[in-house]
Image (spheres, helix red, strand yellow):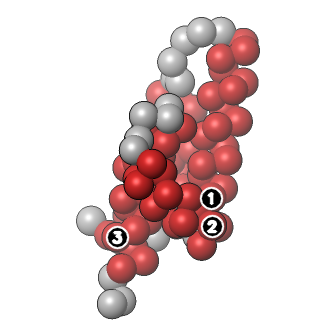
């Protein structure tokens, strides 16, 4: 299993939004949390995502702007997420 880690990163990234929104099942949440605990780049991505959301929610009730998403995505590039595709 050499591609397992990368696949997990891609999956975690895909579910990150839903995880932050708390719309996942407990099984999915457990899977994400397990990955975040074992993968620092993804954990940092999640941390930034939650911080940005909390901040934006306080400042204004608008959805995350694309520029911010791009920044998060660039930070996330440190992870091997893109190699999984
Ligand atoms: Zn990861």
Disc number for residue 7: 3
Cβ–Cβ under 8 Å for marks 3 and 1: no
Q: What whole-number distance in Å separates the C-alpha atoms at marks 1 and 2? A: 7 Å
Residue occupying image coordinates x 69% and y 26%: 54
The quadrant the N terminus occupies is: bottom left
**First along the sequence among labels 3 and 1:** 3
Residue occupying image coordinates x 56% and y 58%: 33
Q: Disc 1 beta carbon < 8 A from ligand 1?
A: yes
Residue occupying image coordinates x 42% and y 34%: 23
Cβ–Cβ under 8 Å for marks 1 and 2: yes
2, above or below 74, in the image = below
**First along the sequence among labels 3 and 2:** 3
Image-quadrant location for residue 62: top right
Q: Which residue is mark 2?
A: 37
Secondary structure category for the residue under label 1: helix
19, above or below 59, in the image = below
Number of numbered markers: 3
Nearest-to-viewer mark from 1 and 2: 2
The percent coordinates of residue 82 (x first, y second) are 37, 64
Nearest-to-viewer mark from 3 and 2: 2
Q: Which residue is mark 1?
A: 43
């Amino acid at each position: 299993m050499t591609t397992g880690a990368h696949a997990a990163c891609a999956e975690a990234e895909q579910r990150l939004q839903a995880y932050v929104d708390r719309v996942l099942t407990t099984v999915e949440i457990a899977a994400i949390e397990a990955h975040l605990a074992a993968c620092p780049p993804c954990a940092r991505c999640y941390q930034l995502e939650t911080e940005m959301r909390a901040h934006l929610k306080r400042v204004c009730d608008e959805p995350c702007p694309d520029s911010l998403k791009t920044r998060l995505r660039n930070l996330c590039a440190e992870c091997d997420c893109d190699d999984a595709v």
